[in-house]
Image (tube, rainbow, N blue to C red):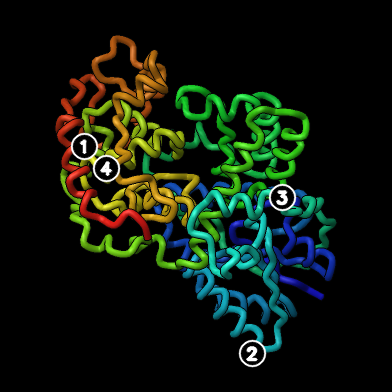
Amino acid sequence: MTIIWWIRRDMRLADNPALCAAARNGHVIPVFICDPSVEALGAAPKWRLGLGLEHLMAQINALGGQVILRRSDALEALKSLIQDTGATAVYWSRLYDADSIARDTRVKTGLQEIGVDTQSFEGHLLFEPWTTQTKQGGFYKVYTPFWRNVKERDIPSALPTPKLTFTDPPATDDLTSWHLGAEMNRGADVVLAHARVGESAAQDRLGDFIDENIGHYKARRDFPAEPVCSGLSENLTYGEISPRQIWHAGQHALFEGAQGAEHFLKELVWREFAYHLLYYVPNLPQDNFRSGWEKFPWRDDNKDANLWRRGRTGVRFVDAAMREMYVTGTMHNRARMIAASYLTKHLLTDWRVGRAWFEECLIDWDPAANAMGWQWVAGCGPDASPYFRIFNPDGQIDKFDKRGVYLDRWIAEDTPEPSVTALSYFNAVPRSWGLDHNAAYPAPIAPLNDGRLRALAAYSDMPKSG
């Protein structure tokens, strides 16, 4: 048989069930399709996807194969490739957002109508969303019982890299002609220095984390200046490492007595919980999860939100977080909560405004985690943060960055000798923003306590459960 391996968010060779099945059953034609779902990505995730694809293409080339590129509707591209190659099957790894499910269903139906075998496989998650239900038969809306349900589940061992055989490749597009990084402009060179691209880099990241930091993870993970977190969200996003590989490494560390291992595994399962919700509530990225929140007085996009986007609110922790994202394409998790809380609570701006900006700027953007995270902080989401929990950014600095190391890393103004990372922000942003590190740091948009009281008044009228 000749089998098309349709590459999506599984840019790895090891522990890839779809690829292993294709290799086991015949000759493999690796294919990536730049369809509307790719075109719709924000600037940073689209650029980072291109880097991951380029790295995978080099891996396949080293094995004597070639990744075939097509820029088209997925079904039409696959039909054309089947006609050109005589392939009789198409295999892929499942995705769980509504648009991907709709596309994959249409592809499966269209190919089966012409007699082509289509098979989808697990691999993007530890377990499929529909395999976990409450005692009442529904889906979980709260994380803790979800964790209790799945923490003892037997997760299959990771699969080895399969032995691949290839056929003569058909014509392919040139990846550079797609210009996937065009919207990054001059920011691409800045962010590139912080990206860790590809399967081998992901494995190195995991190994370093297990060897050096997992023991400190629970105690120190909230301190944004400390390199305690794994950074693996970037690689998980594009499938350069599998969650099973991470799970088993964490389980081994737990068995060896690493103090932070269980908490790390809980965070990995938090990602599973996000996908569990996204599967059962497909409108999670667009609509308030909790009923009654349509009446909340969210502000639409506004001038304060624009200052937030540019790291110019005058609130140092918030601005440092936003600048970190613009320079590195990622943001420390504690900083994400602070930045999101400030936008949705102190500035009473719709969480969807923030979600869209993160979607534009994060190289580890994930449709499930981003949607659930924003709704959790805003108070309208599943397992939400209590409405009265309004982070004080200055208080958070006192607690988690008392010496100001994180602030100095990202804030350049009013500093005699700014750090290289702080200065790099001004090299990454569009020139049209007119920012200059020699200018004075801005005064706060508004007193923090005023924003807190305004938010409490607005939140007090909303339902506390969904």
Q: Which mark is residue 452?
A: 1
* Residue toward you, 82 or 309: 309
Residue drawn at the location 37% of the way across and 27% of the way down: 424
Residue 202: x and y, percent?
65, 40
Q: Nearer the viewer, mark 3 or mark 4?
A: 3
Which part of the image, by quadrant, shows the N terminus?
A: bottom right
Q: Earlier in the sequence, mark 4 or mark 2?
A: 2
Q: Nearer the viewer, mark 2 or mark 3?
A: 3
Q: Dot 1: within a 10 Å radius of its alpha carbon, few (fewer than 14), some, or many (20 or more) residues?
A: many
The residue that label 2 is drawn on is: 113
Residue drawn at the location 67% of the way across and 70% of the way down: 120
Image position of 52 (left or right of 294): right
Circles 1, 3 touching at the beta carbon (< 8 Å): no
Residue 269: x and y, percent?
60, 48
Amino acid type indicated by mark 2:
Glu
- Label 2, label 1: how far apart the Cα atoms are: 58 Å
Q: Is residue 189 visible?
A: no
Amino acid type indicated by mark 1:
Arg
Location of residue 280 with respect to 108 vertically, above or below: above
Residue 371: x and y, percent?
41, 54
Image position of 46 (left or right of 244): left
Q: Is residue 123 visible?
A: yes
- Label 1, label 3: how far apart the Cα atoms are: 41 Å
- Label 2, label 3: how far apart the Cα atoms are: 41 Å
Classify mark 2: helix, strand or loop: loop
The residue that label 4 is drawn on is: 343
Residue drawn at the location 64% of the way across and 83% of the way down: 111
Residue drawn at the location 67% of the way across and 29% of the way down: 208
